[in-house]
Amino acid sequence: MRTTMTTTGLVLRATKTGEADRALLLLTPDGLVSAMAKGALRMRSKLFSGTGLFCYSEFVLFEGKTMHVVDAASVKQVFWGLHEDVERMALAMYYAELAATLSPTGEEAEAQLRLLLNSLYFLSEGKRPPRQLKAVYELRAMTLAGFMPDLVACADCAKYEGGAFCFDALRGCLYCAECAAKRDLACNLDTPALSAMRYIVFSEDAKLFSFSVSPQVAQQLGAVTQHWTLVCLNRPLRSLEFLRTIWEPGGGDATAEDMDGTVPSEPETKPEETGE
Ligand SMILES: [Zn+2]
């Protein structure tokens, strides 16, 4: 008798293989699952719609010799807006590569799946600027994965707020301007960007996306969260390189991405709850 299992899952990868099969990588509440959807690319296949990239579906899987085989897939949610522009799709691909790289298990898998579904929703609906959504996803995903940065206060003198701070991604901690200077580090966070970082790390799930920042703050925040992500993972991500070619054609405007201590111009708004 075949062993079957039923699970919800988000399609992180759907690669065409053979004549019309799809090799899937799913993020389920229990972790990553590889599965083959045989004949899914035939237009009349019952598996066609439920096994597309970024589909969130309920799957019935049975155990094959080397991997799971999809027996049924019924769609729960499709993020149509992702397919509307290349920037959204590129960012979604980056989310997917990060989630696959983190390969969460147990309770963390469920939390990562929830974060990813919410992030895809806001991205797909165009409800937040993509740069802000990227920073939220990076920092929250790293925090869930056990890489919570120490954002409480300056690691040297315990100063909590006031003026610019330096987030040292190599040590995962903060320094105030004075202590950063003593360590030969440049400040990379003005007050609104630091507030946003703290918000992303400490807010409850339901309010995670309920803040707004100016484009300048989003840029500053994004430079720091990206650096933190790359330090934590300690490996390059292809989808990030692709995203950067969209955001910085020719690599010309990489001001805050350089992490060379450049502090962008004065931020304009503070994190706030929008009451959503
Ligand atoms: Zn200090």
Image (cartoon, rainbow, N blue to C red):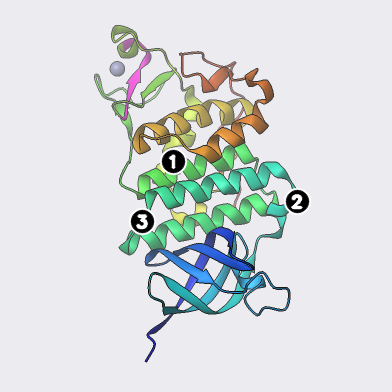
Q: Position of residue 88 (x, y in %)?
A: 66, 46
Visible residue check, residue 210: no
Q: Is residue 14 above or below residue 177?
A: below
Q: Are marks 1 and 3 in contact (CB under 8 Å)?
A: no
Q: Identify residue type, mark 1.
A: Leu
Q: Which residue is identified by label 3? A: 104
The residue depicted at 74 percent of the width and 46 percent of the height is: 85
Counting residues from the N terminus, which is met first, the one under dot 2 or under dot 3?
2
The amino acid at mark 2 is Glu
Q: Which residue appears farthest toward the left when viewing the image?
A: 156
Pick out the residue farthest to the bottom.
1
Q: Which mark is residue 84?
A: 2
Q: Amino acid at mark 3?
A: Pro
Q: Is mark 2 within 8 Å of ligand 1?
A: no
Packing grade of label 3 (10 A; few <14, some 14-19, many >=20) is: many
Cβ–Cβ under 8 Å for marks 1 and 2: no
> How far from the left and from the top, in percent, is residue 179?
30, 13
Label 3 residue SS: loop
Q: Is mark 3 within 8 Å of ligand 1?
A: no
Which numbered disc, 1 or 3, marks the residue closer to the eye?
3
Give the x, y percent position of residue 129: 65, 40
View quadrant of ligand 1:
top left
**Residue identified by numbered label 1:** 139
Whether residue 183 sits left or right of residue 7 in the image: it is: left
Give the vertical position of 19 relative to 242 (above or below). below
Residue at the image point whose x is 48% and y is 25% from the top? 191
